[in-house]
Amino acid sequence: MDVLFLAADRTMECSRWSVAAGEVVFEQCPPLRPFPVRKGKRLAPGWWWSSTTGRLVPYGSAAMRLHVMLLDRDSRISSLAARPLELRWRDPSGVRAHVPQLMLRFGDGQAVLADCTSRPELSQRQRSLASAVGHMCTAVGWRYWVLGPVDPVYRRNVTWLAGYRHPRHRGGQALAAAVHEAFTEPAPLWEGVRRVGDPLVVLPALFHALWVGRLTGDLSVPMHERMPVWVQGSG
């Protein structure tokens, strides 16, 4: 099994997967190739500014954009990259190759390759591919995920919060501390905001705190002004 990737000077490298998986920092590699523009698709390829890395992460579909957003909010993840490597292997049908859409790494060093789909069930071909890639990842201590549909309410809530993911929405240290203090005990969103000050100033800081996880609430139901909000770990 081999792996292809772009080195720092953007030359193509080919190494044994069993060796490179433990030596190459794939999340720092540029994408092997751009995502194609497909006629008839509602969403063209684009770029997501990642609050995790402070860099742009390319995406090629609506499903991939959704999961880049959700992974970007996961505080356990320290790195996130798109298409940094290509796996090649042989099976009875010949040489096969696959470029996973995403590579992420957790803070504890665990590495994961992932592909995204909008369909609730995989085709036979997709299941076969997922099985092969999954075995290759397991062999080197990595993991492989197929990321599928997401609850629409949760998706809408996180999409809203993502608009406040940039650190500029945190506000100053005094405002961030006041927002934290207002929700030390669970409180309805609007009541806590009004205790802090002008909603036009406080709400962006509140939504940023919900994005980064300093505050939390039940995002499985639609967000509203009476939604209970509390400091992470205190509810």
Image: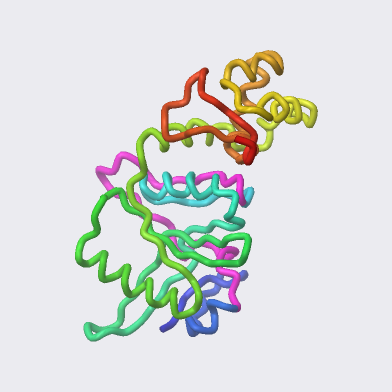
Give the quarter of the image for residue 128: bottom left
Residue 58, compared with residue 223, is above or below; it is below
Percent across and percent down for residue 224 are 48, 21
Q: Is residue 152 shown left or right of residue 174? A: left
208 or 2, nearer to the observer: 208
Question: Could you tell whether 228 is left or right of 97 in the image?
Answer: right
Front in this rendered view, residue 95 or 44: 95
Up-down: is 52 above or below 139?
A: above
Look at the image and give the residue range highlighted in magenta.
Answer: 23-52
**Colour setting:** rainbow
Q: How many marks?
A: 0
Pinpoint residue 48: horizontal percent, then vertical percent: 51, 45
Seen at 61% across and 27% down, the residue is: 186
Q: Quadrant of the C terminus?
A: top right
Magenta region, main secondary structure: loop
Which residue of the protein is positioned furthest toward the left in this rendering?
124
Magenta stretch encompasses residue 29: yes
Q: Position of residue 65 (x, y in %)?
A: 43, 46
Residue under the point 45% across and 80% down:
139
Q: Position of residue 225 (x, y in %)?
A: 52, 18
Quarter of the image with the N terminus is bottom left
Residue 3 on the magenta span: no
**Residue 38 sits above or below residue 134 on the image:** above
At 49% across and 31% down in the image, what residue appears? Answer: 160
Residue appearing at x 69%, y 24% in the figure: 182
